[in-house]
Amino acid sequence: MSEILEQISTAVIEGEVEEMVDLTEDALGDDISAEDILNKGLMAGMDYVGVEFKAGNVFVPEVLRSARAMQESMSVLKPLLEESGVQMLGKVLLGTVKGDLHDIGKNLVGMMCEGAGFEVKDLGKDIAPEAFADAVKEFEPDVLGMSALLTTTMRVMETTINVLEEAGVRDKVKVMIGGAPVTQAFSDQIGADGYASNAASAAELAKQMVGRA
Ligand code: B1M
């Protein structure tokens, strides 16, 4: 791998937010394509962060900083990637369910999915089942990710799946769920397509769901 791509990858791992724009512009100046910077620099770095996060070797603040570093670089790359028509892995729609204001974990899931190469639309928190269904129709995601942190709000995931069915869009999207009280058994029980226990696993699951794992 070229030296500058290795520097970009390391800068993501170390969360060097302030250096990212310069490094990205240097790489472009060396005639490295935006796609290579994304795949061999940024994503290589985020993959490593995901593995270390899952293993318990890095923690939430470090992951957030790495994600911010990646976003800095993406602000330079995004228009170039769009121009060159580079295919993203797919689209992920995210939100925390109605009645629930916890969004830190959900935000991490979004960042890891972006890091894995998905286009992510985040609806935010306290999202009603009908709003999820409307957004599925409008954004046409491959994966719908719902987060809940309260035992009282996790049931809203089931309601949301029912509303997706009523709206005729349940079979158009894979449903991924997560959050501290959520389990695989609960996912099976409410008819979701999959459960992930952490943000790195969520990005992996999303890849599996679009057949790109
Ligand atoms: Co609240 N809260 N909180 N809280 N809060 C918990 C969840 C709680 C366990 C604390 C406790 O009592 N020990 C408890 C829930 C009890 C229960 O239901 N079993 C609780 C409670 C009771 C409440 C209130 C009711 C308190 C009150 O007002 N009486 C209230 C409810 C408000 C509401 O939502 N309607 C409330 C409010 C809040 C704050 C607003 C103050 C704040 C949230 C701020 C925010 O998110 N912007 C807050 C916080 C910070 C917490 C704790 C301390 C931390 C949550 C967190 O961000 N963790 C939490 C206790 C704890 O967990 N230690 C607690 C870090 C985050 C990275 O982890 O969200 O689990 P987590 O996400 C992980 C995985 O779960 C997974 O990946 C993430 C990263 O690996 N994941 C997914 C998450 N979503 C996923 C989606 C996926 C896949 C994986 O696919 C789509």
Image (tube, rainbow, N blue to C red):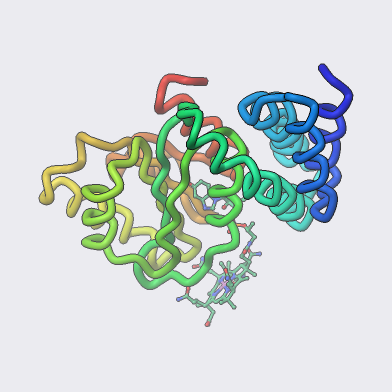
Q: Is residue 45 left or right of residue 195?
A: right
Is residue 57 visible from the viewing direction of this image? no
Q: Residue at x 72, y 24 (%)?
A: 32
Q: Is residue 122 left or right of residue 60?
A: left
Q: Position of residue 141 (x, y in %)?
A: 33, 41
Q: Quadrant of residue 129?
A: bottom left
* Residue projecting furthest to the top: 1
Q: Position of residue 186 (x, y in %)?
A: 38, 45
Q: Ligand 1 sits in which quadrant? A: bottom right
Q: Residue at x 11, y 50 (%)?
A: 166
Is residue 146 visible from the viewing direction of this image? yes
Along the line of sight, the residue nearer the viewer: 175 or 151 = 175
Image quarter (top left, top right, bottom left or bottom right) of the N terminus: top right
Q: Position of residue 11 (x, y in %)?
A: 84, 41
Q: Is residue 114 left or right of residue 25?
A: left
Give the number of marks.
Answer: 0
Q: Is residue 167 above or below residue 80?
A: below
Q: Quadrant of residue 43?
A: top right
Along the line of sight, the residue nearer the viewer: 22 or 112 = 22
Q: Is residue 169 left or right of residue 103?
A: left
Q: Position of residue 36 (x, y in %)?
A: 67, 24
Q: Residue at x 15, y 46 (%)?
A: 165
Q: Is residue 15 above or below residue 23?
A: below
Q: Residue at x 62, y 40 (%)?
A: 77
